[in-house]
Image (spheres, grey):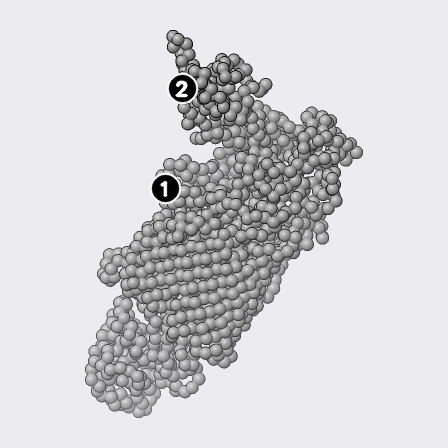
Amino acid sequence: MKQYRNAIYIGCLLAMLTGSCVDPYNPPAIAAAESYLVVEGFINSGSDPSVFTLSRTRKQANAGNFIPEVDAQVSIEGENGERYTLAEQTEGTYASSSLTLNPTTRYRIHILTQRKEYASDYVPVKSTPPIDSVTWTLAQDGIQLFVTTHDPENNTRYYRWDAEETWEYVSAFFSNYQYKDKQMFVRYDDDLIFTCWRSDQTKQIYLGSSARLTDDVIYKQPIMFTPVATGKLMEKYSILVKQYALSQQGFEYWQILEKNTESTGSIFDAQPSQLQGNIHCLTNPQEPVIGFVDASSIQQKRIFIVGRSLPFRTINIGYETCDLDTVPNTPQHLEDKFGDGYFVPVNPIGSSSGIIAYTYSINQCVDCREKGGTTSKPDFWQ
Amino acid sequence: MINFITSFFLLLITLIAGFSPLSAQDSQHKLISGAYENTSFEKVVTDIESRTSYRFFFDITQVDTVTVTLQFQDKTLPYILAKIFAGTDFRFAIDRHQRVFITKDRSILTRILTDSLAPAAPTENQPTVNAPFALDEANSAVHTAAENKLYELGNKTADIGSGKAILTGTVKDSKTGEPVIGAVVYIENPRIGVSTNQFGYYSISLPKGRHELMIKSLGMRDTKRQIMLYSDAKLDVEMQDQVIGLKEVVVEAEKSVNVTSMQMGVERLTIKTIKQTPTVFGEADILRVVLTLPGVKTVGEASTGFNVRGGSTDQNLILYNDATIYNPSHLFGFFSAFNPDLVKNVELYKSGIPAKYGGRLSSVLEITSRDGNKKTFGGSGGIGLLTGRLTLEGPIIKDKTSFILGGRSTYSSWLLGQLKNTAYSNSKASFYDLNLQLTHEFNEKNSLYVTGYLSRDRFKFNTDTLYGYQNQIASLKWKHVFSNKLYGVLTTGVSNYQYSVESDKNPVNAFNLAFDLAQTNVKADFSYLLGDRHTLDFGAGSILYKIHPGSYTPQGDGSFVVPETIQAEQALESAFYLSDQFEITPKLSVNVGLRYSLFHFLGANDVLRYAPGLPKSEATVIDTVSYSSGKTIQTYQGPEYRLSARYVLTDNASVKLSYNTLRQYIHMLSNTTAISPTDIWKLSDPHSKPQLGDQISLGWYKNFQNNTIETSVELYHKNIKNFLDYKSGARLILNPHIETDVMGTEGKAYGIEVLFKKSTGKLNGWVSYTYARTLLRVIDANAGELINDGEWYPANFDKPHDFTLIGNYRFSHRFSTSLNVTYSTGRPVTLPLSYFDMGGSTRTYYSERNEYRIPDYFRVDFSMNIEGNHKIKKLAHSSWTLAVYNLTGRKNVYSVYFKSENGRVNGYKLSIFGQPIPTVTYNFRF
């Protein structure tokens, strides 16, 4: 159904609309809604701990209003009687130690909150086949990433991916000096603020299925698209793709979630579907619980893309308005200019009598950390 | 040709005769004696001519089969001729010059208007012309004369006596020879009226004697005939198009018909009305005009799918020349799939559905195409913003056989290619439709109609996926007139609908998904005039369905796709019906009908059986039963009642009541808001029962100002059972057990429709207001989940208040303007109740369905029609239509939706046509 979204474009086009036919909409204030338990996570059959995030539905869309479910007793239970407790790491996040699960047993998550008891259905343990490759192709305004995998056992069939992207980027001007304690100092390696690395989690749901194919093969399944305009392709870009095997029901759950919240906006939109997971409130069976629990492992693969080699004009993305100016090298001028940290010195202008002035620019143009990254290079960086 | 020359000659001499002074009046009564034995008529004539001053005029080829065996003594010539021609089609007339005209079927009127039978006649010397032999020229002087003439119909010499006689005939367009459908033929006193059927044929039972027969039809100039009815007879009437005005008349209602006719809940549109209503792309669009009618709603302007009185979009039977059209739209519903140049008229039955129709719950939309011009060749066409069309028509055998061929296509693919944005220039969207209609009149009693129709759409967006769908229909219709009282129509045809989706970009996943539906139908419909006060309609028909619900096949050698084909479904739907229109008193009439429908779901098929009492799911399958080909797997049957009654309160007011029950055995599966190109159709089977509907409606009708202003109020209440709704995440495509994903729903709809219509004059149009509700609820105990906990909730198209104004003002014959104003309550939507975080983003959680509404809808359209001059001798007549759709530029909200983007939830409202859209269309005729 995704492709039909394009029908709107045709509609807008046919109507010879010059602008957009989509405008922001603020829904009317909704009367008090009940708050339901939201469970995100999976029972990890691999060597890593199982991590679950428990929260509550909320009335405000803003992520700042996130309501963690604290002080719950969370455990993973096997049909054979195994039981592993999860400890609360941060508010609402519960993690197990590294578990060795019995592949012939089914497991579930059991949650006891302050007031109610919840449990998921028992789910069989799946193991996720490794990712064969992560590839990419050039598009007009970015790069499209693909994932290829297969299960020789023809057993997995349903897949979900998410990813962590990391990119190296630079600021507009390489600053050799810093103004500190009313004095100019030369920057050394540790103080450089020109090159940064920043990481982010993908925010979309990527699903794939080979259920209709003879072999359990996922070939070049499109996952994320990285637009040039984000500036992520400026220097070097890396993506760590994580693959999870799903049960068929789990796949359907994620598919509904994707349709309800991402594939909307076509003229053929369906009614939002009821999101039915496999977690139930034992205390009050009528109470909806959001989330689906599967037991599987993670497979991951990282690739690097050198942004400078791409045929895009990536220089200065995000720094289009940056300019240099000069300030005379007198203590008063320097204090006036750099005292509050808004401006940062870039380079000295010298003459036979020494440094007579400094070029400078605003902090956002000079300090790459202003764009959310860090100057410490990640361990995996190549 | 001989016929024509003879006619012309006869006409000429009749004209001369008319101007001559009266003479030899009593010589007509000269008495003759004689005896003939198997003598040819020609010899008899020679004999009589030799003995009297009578002179005979006739077409020798017509009378060469007539032989005379007769003895007479001292009789007048009229007596003798009456004896000779008793029981034949021949008619005779004798003028004052003792000229005797023998004609077949149509009698010549030789008397001038001072004849004692026509006391109200005007001057003595007015030329007399016989309308049946009027020349082709649409000469209104001739018509006026025809209106004033007295037609002596039937066997004139028969004792006129009392009692009734049946008058039949065909009403035709004088210019093209095409039948006029739905023309009303009536007399005022006593009030007796009928309307012509789809062949222009009428049959009316009248008291013998003198009448003024009125003939009226939408878009045609009213006409009348002075008749003297002696016995059962035939009278063909030609009506003139409103030639000069071209578009002067917008809604030429059938005047008092809305008050006097039995029918209620029917809306009739002529192509003129349709062409005058401004549309978004300039081209006349049937379905868009249908959407403006009271009681018809749609989810939004991107869709031509329509909901009639609370019914869903698949509950409309859309007939194009009696063949079913499954997807009546082009380009996802932005255009309707009917070429306006080929359409003659459109009728929408909302209630009081006649017994001859069945198979859908909510409405019948009957679209009748034009017959080709039987007299001259011609053509028409138009160039609009996105489409071009051309129609050709003409006689194959003059006055007997005609054709009309029309085609329409779009240049939107080319337009898309011109755009800079690659998302557009890599897209394509094309469609076309072709229509062919052949009409052949073997003789007066037998006519044959052949219709062919093809519409095809292909589109591809900036992706590798190509979508396509097409409708194909062919139908053959044979009309036979058995007698004045009985005629029948035999129809057979096929309708096919198919779509496909293919993608070959990714070699491993390359696929082709296909769906097709074929129906073959045959039916016979009869109409019989029983006595004076009963009209019986009866008939029977069958439809054989074959559906391939889906096949999924690999494309190319590298594809790993496992071919999958959902087993075909086949069924036979049959029905027979009988209805009687009974005039109990002149004021009270009833129409009582019964339709009995029978549905056989046939093998070969493997039917799953589920554990009783549990929700149907893959887990509860207990068994599979295989049926061999042609074996009946499941039978559904039942009566459908069609009752209506009319009581005339005064000359211009009446009340009507109708009650209908209907059954529907084929369902469209769609969980999208608008009709989408990949919606599939499914037959009733052991798991999905037929949909049942009943509707009761009550209406009050009153006309003012000499029937030029019509008002009506209709109330209705409708129930729908076994309507299908879908479970969460229902898979409709390639689902071998769809019954596990659907749940039974019931619906109720009620409302009131108020209409005020001015049909004639410089200013005309209509204003309607509707209050209507449509509510649904899930009642399936085995559904597993219940939408809104099984409570009533509003349907997607529940828009309680609806106001429409369609107005036209004619400044001159060459310049007219139209204005549309539409207001309706916003349709219901489901809004998120709360939010949560999952999968790296904040997401929405929805609850109660359709609890909120989008903002109200309001739109104004305006158009101007400018005609070229109206010289009759001209290479081509052209006109320009300038229109602005959505004049106020209001951004009417089509839908609101919420999307998780970059971790946040953003709300949007989508409007389809959010700006004024000006269009120019050039139309021509030749």
Can residue A370 be spotted in the picture?
Answer: yes
Q: Nearer the viewer, residue A162 or A211?
A: A162
Pointers 1 and 2 in contact (C-beta within 8 Å): no
Of tags 1 and 2, the one toward the viewer is 2
* Marks 1/2 same chain: no
Q: Position of residue B50 (x, y in %)?
A: 23, 84
The residue that appears at 40% across and 19% down in the rendered structure is: A326
The amino acid marked with disc number 1 is Trp
Q: Which residue is mark 2?
A: A326
Q: Quadrant of the N terminus of chain B?
A: bottom left
**Chain letter of the residue beneath label 2 in the structure image:** A
Residue B108, above or below A10: below
> What residue sits right under mark 1 in the picture?
B414
Res A40 quadrant in image: top right
Query: Which residue type carries mark 2?
Result: Thr
Quadrant the C terminus of chain B occupies: bottom left
- Dividing the picture into quadrants, the one containing residue A77 is top right
User: x, y percentage for residue B603?
Assistant: 61, 52
Q: In the picture provided, is A287 more to the left or to the right than B491?
A: right
Q: Is residue B643 left or right of residue A56?
A: left
Disc 1, SS: helix
Chain under disc 1: B
Residue at 40% x, 78% y: name it: B187
User: What kind of element bears circle 2?
Assistant: strand
Q: Residue at x 67, y 34 (%)?
A: A92
How far apart are the alpha carbons under marks 1 and 2?
A: 56 Å
Q: Position of residue B813 (x, y in %)?
A: 28, 63
